[in-house]
Image: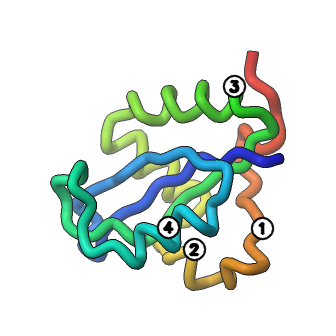
Amino acid sequence: MNNYIYILTDCNRTCLHVGMTHDLNKAIKTYKETPGLFFDACSKVSRLVYHEALASEEAALCRFNEISTYTRMQKERLIRKYNPNWVDLGLVRPLAIFTPLSGPYSGRMLS
């Protein structure tokens, strides 16, 4: 089973939200259908701009903690490396046939 790390943003790119899930389709659907989550000070973060698939939950948690400590500039560089135009990846690929982005940590276990 894959574990996913993702970054969502709002329509103005003012907020970058890092998340981790086992079911990326369900997570994105929840964000798109919820007008504003109580823990998010930002407006509606529903645009998927980055994601990675990792083989184990431990690797995903390690990567989640790493990306969560990044500064905004580091997160923006990571996003631009794989998605230079900040396209909403949830719209580009139908979520039913979603295939993960191949990033530097995709499918690789971290020790």
Question: Which residue matches tag 1?
Answer: 99
Secondary structure found at label 2: helix
Question: Which residue matches tag 2?
Answer: 89
10 Å crowding of disc 3: few (<14), some (14-19), many (20+):
some
Give me the C-alpha separation between circle 1 and circle 2: 10 Å
Across and down, in percent, residue 5 comes to 59, 46
Secondary structure found at label 4: strand
Closer to the chain start, of discs 4 and 1, is 4
Across and down, in percent, residue 39 comes to 24, 49
Give me the C-alpha separation between circle 4 and circle 3: 23 Å
Closer to the chain start, of discs 4 and 3, is 4
Closer to the chain start, of discs 1 and 2, is 2
Identify which amino acid the numbered label 3 is placed on.
Glu
The answer to whether mark 4 and mark 1 are in CB contact below 8 A is: no
Q: Is residue 52 above or below residue 93?
A: above
Secondary structure found at label 3: helix
Q: Is residue 26 above or below residue 92?
A: above
Closer to the chain start, of discs 1 and 3, is 3
71 and 10: which one is in front? 10
The answer to whether mark 2 and mark 4 are in CB contact below 8 A is: yes
Across and down, in percent, residue 97 comes to 78, 78
4 and 35: which one is in front? 35
Across and down, in percent, residue 94 comes to 68, 84
Question: Which residue matches tag 4?
Answer: 48
Question: Which residue matches tag 3?
Answer: 58
Viewer-side label of 1, 3: 3
- What label does residue 87 carry, if any? none
Closer to the chain start, of discs 2 and 4, is 4
Identify which amino acid the numbered label 4 is placed on.
Leu
Q: Residue at x 61, y 59 (%)?
A: 82
